[in-house]
Amino acid sequence: MTDHRVTTEEIENDMIGSIAIGTLKSSGPTTLALMIASVAARCERPVVLLDAAPDPDLHLWARKGFGTSDLKVKRVERIKDLPDMVEDARRQVGEHRRRATE
């Protein structure tokens, strides 16, 4: 049996820039997105979650103060705004990384 655990160092060096999670049914994409984002944020990687789900669970969770400085949640009100919001999130993450290395 092979051990497929990933180390923190591997996550820090190989983190994917963008991940999209969706489903036709409501069977856990919010929980999955939050778990992946939490692991990245715990490794001090900046994360922006864009909540486009019909039920704004992630957005409501963040408004209650459960987010961290490395984990931000933004609500997507109109799907047509999603591409611009993704680009804006990428810019924010890039700026955060540049500041961290200065």
Image (cartoon, rainbow, N blue to C red):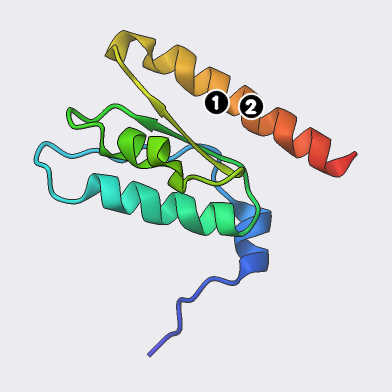
Which residue: 30% across, 15% down?
Answer: 77
Q: Quarter of the image for the C terminus: give it.
A: top right
Q: Which residue is mark 2?
A: 92
The local secondary structure at tag 2 comes to helix
Which quarter of the image is occupied by the N terminus? Answer: bottom left
Side (left or right) of 4 relative to 11: left
Is the residue 40 above or below the residue 47 in the image?
below
| The image quarter in which residue 51 lies | top left
Answer few, some or many: residues within 10 Å of disc 2's Cα (few below 14, many 20 plus, some between 14 and 19): some
Q: Nearer the viewer, residue 23 or 26?
A: 26
Residue at the disc numbered 1:
89
User: Pointers 1 and 2 in contact (CB under 8 A)?
Assistant: yes
Task: Name the residue type under label 2.
Answer: Gln
Label 1 sits on a secondary structure element that is helix
The three-letter amino acid code for the residue at tag 1 is: Ala
Q: Position of residue 92 (x, y in %)?
A: 64, 26
Q: Position of residue 7 (x, y in %)?
A: 59, 72
Where 85 sits versus 29, above or below? above
Figure disc tally: 2
